[in-house]
Amino acid sequence: MNANSILILLVDDEPPVIDMLQRVGRQHFPQATFASCNSPQETLDYLDEAANARPQLILLDIDLHAPTNGLDLLAQIQQHPRAKGIPVVMFTVSAAEPDISRAYEVGAVAYTQKPDSLTGWVNYVQLLRDYWFSMAILPPTK
């Protein structure tokens, strides 16, 4: 990774969501590399592995179809030594007020909803690029 790129870790258990974000990302956010994990354990294993580049941003779904949901995983990520300081954006279909409140209480920096159309995906990725790459200063990958 260099100053002209960003590593984003997407945590979602739905391969079509991962595929869509990566495909739209290649076209509209070429500065980003999207790594992905599809379970809470895979995410923690990714963060544990020193050979893996440290992500600069994490997009985290709530419903991971596992005993540990994204909100519980968020709390674990916040305590993980290699993840401290990495902004976590909730990336979910849920608009439930308790989920939104808990996400912010546990440490999410933003709560966003997954797009439901190709235009929505393009807009989401462009906003992600404009804010998290062009405007915000993120922690280094090391």
Image (cartoon, rainbow, N blue to C red):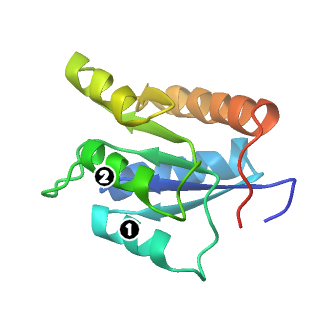
Q: Where is 84 relative to 52, above or below?
A: above
Q: Residue at x 75, y 40 (%)?
A: 133
Work out whether mark 2 precedes mark 1 in sequence or the reverse, and give the earlier one.
Answer: 1
Q: Residue at x 71, y 62 (%)?
A: 141
The spot of residue 39 in percent (x, y) is 29, 63
Helix or strand or loop: what does disc 2 sit on? helix
Q: Residue furthest left?
A: 67
The spot of residue 98 in percent (x, y) is 21, 21
Residue topped by disc 2:
73
Residue 39 visible in the shown view: no
Q: Is residue 106 left or right of residue 120?
A: left
Q: Is residue 65 left or right of residue 41?
A: left
- Where the N terminus falls, by quadrant? bottom right
Q: Residue at x 34, y 62 (%)?
A: 38
Residue topped by disc 1:
44
Viewer-side residue, 28 vs 31: 31
